[in-house]
Image (cartoon, helix red, strand yellow):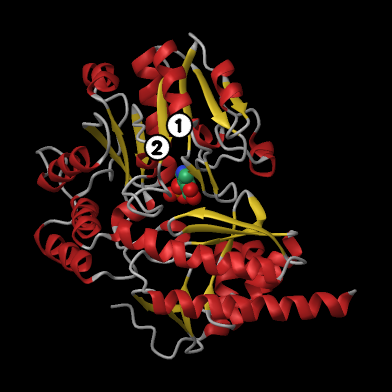
Amino acid sequence: MLDYGSLDVEGLRARFKAHINGGLFALVAFMGLDEAEIEAEGWLVRDSKGRQFIDCLGGYGVFNFGHRHPKIVAAVEAQLRRQPLSSKLLMSPPAVMLAEKLAEITPGNLQKCFFANSGTEAVEGALKIARLATGRKKIIYTSRAFHGKTLGSLSATDREKHRAPFDPLLGQFNVVPFGDADALVAAVDGDTCALIFEPVQGEGGIFPAPEGYLAAAREACDKTGALLIFDEVQTGMGRTGKNFACEWDGVAPDIMCLAKALGGGVMPIGAVIGTPEVWKNFEENPLVHTSTFGGNPLACAAALAACDVLIEERLAENALLRGEEMLAGLTEIGREFPELINGIRGRGLMIGIDFNNGDIAELFIAMMIELGVFVAFALNKPDIIRIEPPLTITSEVVAEVLTRIRAACAHVQGIMSELI
Ligand SMILES: Cc1ncc(COP(=O)(O)O)c(C=O)c1O
């Protein structure tokens, strides 16, 4: 184990600035996040000052199973001793077992898997496989969407601040307003390769798709031969109260992207899962898209154990119940602090607090850190704070988090009234 010993935190700060990113350090230091993370277990994280935090950020959607879930850690330890990385010449049993498991637990006829290492890679794979399958180029994406920051995924991500420095991005990517079924139906035509969106937008500010939107998307794609891609990188693996968020609408895509929690909070892994029809051209030209580390045994062992834990511990159900408690409590707090909070929305344990502006949201984060709770803003909409704790949390922890959120709002309200 890396010996943290008597960690020199001041030195670590200087080395972070010297060798990682000074601008990033300044950004986090401003919110009181300039300590080091030492260890974590379940929903708790401890830092170099000995402070303990309830993790309501969940690694931006990674820790559905909490930190170091014992069954997932044990599966990874066993695989580490057997074979962490494979030669890639012979078949790797964990990859085959995981592909079969995902075919079993995902909705619709998603039977084929390509493994990557992250969310953006899963989206890149999905976009390439869709173009390969249809021979068409045009991709439709949605306003506020976040699909990752590599060039292909960024071309479908709707934040000018992150896109503009890299123009020109990929051609034939067209944006439609998220949630507007008529606009979507009008945009999808016989030239469309694929329509990609998140069933609940995460980094766009926690916006669940309105009722009927997924069904309208399915129908438009079926009519025109376009492929429907659901990016469940953040919503998958129980987060919204179903194993996969599209199950709320009973609509299955042609291609699904998974990552984040798929690795059980222990290993990084991404996956593209598609129907046999979508995979046909890929099977004719199987080396057209590859990844050295994608589907490695360690990551697959973690993901396999994560799938088992998801089902055995009925985590989607717990996300739904605890999510209802959290949403009800937050709605009450929203009513108590209308000067700060515009609204609360979400599904399962993917909840957004919509603050009246970004400055209030920043003060709130700083206050929550003081009070021992990790939260952060949505990457594409900094006035929205997301609440995404491990799906293993109990009612008692939900109640404690609500108490601290109420206290943080009272503090922020006090500061705001002093400023006026
Ligand atoms: C819906 C969605 N897709 C893709 C990504 C990109 O994932 P990664 O950061 O692992 O590349 C994210 C990350 O937040 C995401 O929320």
Residue at image position (17%, 44%) is 101
Q: Residue 267, how many percent across, how many down?
A: 30, 58
Q: Quadrant of the N terminus?
A: bottom left
Answer with left or right where residue 86 lies relative to residue 381. Answer: left
Q: Residue 222, how many percent across, how many down?
A: 39, 16
Q: Residue 402, how many percent across, how many down?
A: 54, 75
Answer with left or right where residue 373 lies relative to residue 264. Answer: right
Q: Could you tell me if the residues under marks 2 and 1 are in contact, i.e. CB atoms within 8 Å?
A: yes
Identify the amino acid type marked 1: Leu
Q: In terms of image quadrants, where is residue 3?
A: bottom left
Tag 1: Cα neighbours inside 10 Å, few (<14), some, or many (≥20)?
Answer: many
Q: Which mark is residue 214?
A: 1
Q: Which mark is residue 249?
A: 2
Residue 212 position (above or below residue 375)? above
Front residue of 392 and 115: 392
Front residue of 375 and 5: 375
Badge 1 residue CB within 8 Å of ligand 1: no
